[in-house]
Structure formats: C-alpha cells, structure tokens
C-alpha cells in the first residue's frame, strides 16, 4: 500500500472533471497558447455558502450557469469541524471512499457548465463549502 498523502497538501491538489487528481498518470490538460486563446474576463461573479444540515445526506450546490472557459472555485469553510466530501452526484458524495475530500480551508477548481453539477456531504452537521464563479 502506498504511503498516505500529506494532508497539508490536500488543499492544493487539482482534480479533473471526473474528480481524478492531476498527477503523472493524469496530467493537467493544457489548451491554447499565447495570444487570443484565453477567455475574456466577466463583468461580475456569483457566490454562496452551502451547508450540509445532516451528515450522510448529500446536498446539491446552487443552480448557476458557468460561462464557457471558466471554472468553479469550491472551498471547504475554514470554520468546518470535519471533512467535506465532493462528488458529481449524491451517491458519490455520500461514498467517502470515492468522493474527493476537502479539509477545512482546502479548495478545488472544476470546469463544469453549472454549479449544480456538484454535490457535497460532510462529517459534521452544518459544515459546508463556499463557491465562486465569474458570470456574464
């Protein structure tokens, strides 16, 4: 069995849209290049905090469209008392063996078309996440 990951690094582990950590076997996809390939800045952003009222019952994040080329920033609240589990559906978020864990203050960025594609579960009632995305 491999050595456990350093929990101090969990907050900076990037994941692809399938919740697989970026690494040597799953490299970070690079698109575009110099000049003209980037998305223009958006005029504003949307954000919210979403708690998990009852551990073991996953909560879907808010409905908010994400402009093409932008990512959703999801951060476990710093005041959380336990781990948040992130998944693409309720069943995955509730399965703490396969869900992406976020310790208090840890974050991930996901390139999805809507914030509501993200589900969370928690070890502790009222723990939750904040999310932010640029919008048109």
Image: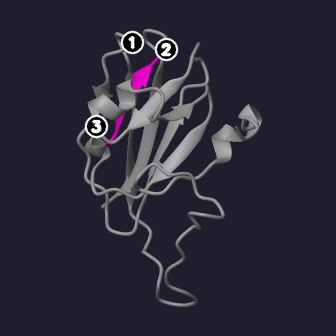
**Left or right side of 21 for 127:** left
Q: Residues within 10 Å of mark 2 (few under 14, many from 20)?
A: some
Distance between mark 3 and mark 2 Cα atoms: 17 Å
> Which mark is first along the chain, 1 or 2?
1
Residue 40 picture quarter: bottom left
Q: How is the image coloured?
A: one colour
x then y, percent, for residue 106: 61, 35
Look at 41% across and 63% down and name the residue there.
70
Q: Is residue 122 magenta?
A: yes
Q: Are marks 2 and 1 in contact (CB under 8 Å)?
A: yes
Magenta segment: 118-123
The residue identified by callout 2 is 123
The residue identified by callout 1 is 55
- For the residue labelled by badge 1, is the local secondary structure a helix, a strand or a loop? loop
Look at 33% across and 42% down and name the residue there.
88
Determine whether 89 is above or below 15 in the image: above
x then y, percent, for residue 34: 58, 89
**Left or right side of 130 for 52:** left
The residue identified by callout 3 is 89
Front position in the image: 73 or 42: 73
Q: Is residue 71 magenta?
A: no
Distance between mark 3 and mark 1 Cα atoms: 15 Å
x then y, percent, for residue 99: 45, 35
Q: Quadrant of the C terminus?
A: bottom left
């Amino acid at each position: 069995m491999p050595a456990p990951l350093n929990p101090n690094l969990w907050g900076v582990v990037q994941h692809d849209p399938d919740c697989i950590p970026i690494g040597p076997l799953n490299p970070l996809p690079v698109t575009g290049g110099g000049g003209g390939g980037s998305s223009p800045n958006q005029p504003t952003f949307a954000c919210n905090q979403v708690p998990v009222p009852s551990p073991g019952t996953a909560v879907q994040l808010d409905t908010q469209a994400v402009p093409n080329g932008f990512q959703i920033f999801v951060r476990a609240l710093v005041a959380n008392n336990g781990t948040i589990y992130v998944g693409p559906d309720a069943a995955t978020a509730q399965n703490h063996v396969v869900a992406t864990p976020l310790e208090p203050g840890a974050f991930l960025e996901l390139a999805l078309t809507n914030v509501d594609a993200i589900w969370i579960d928690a070890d502790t009632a009222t723990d939750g996440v904040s999310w932010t995305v640029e919008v048109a």
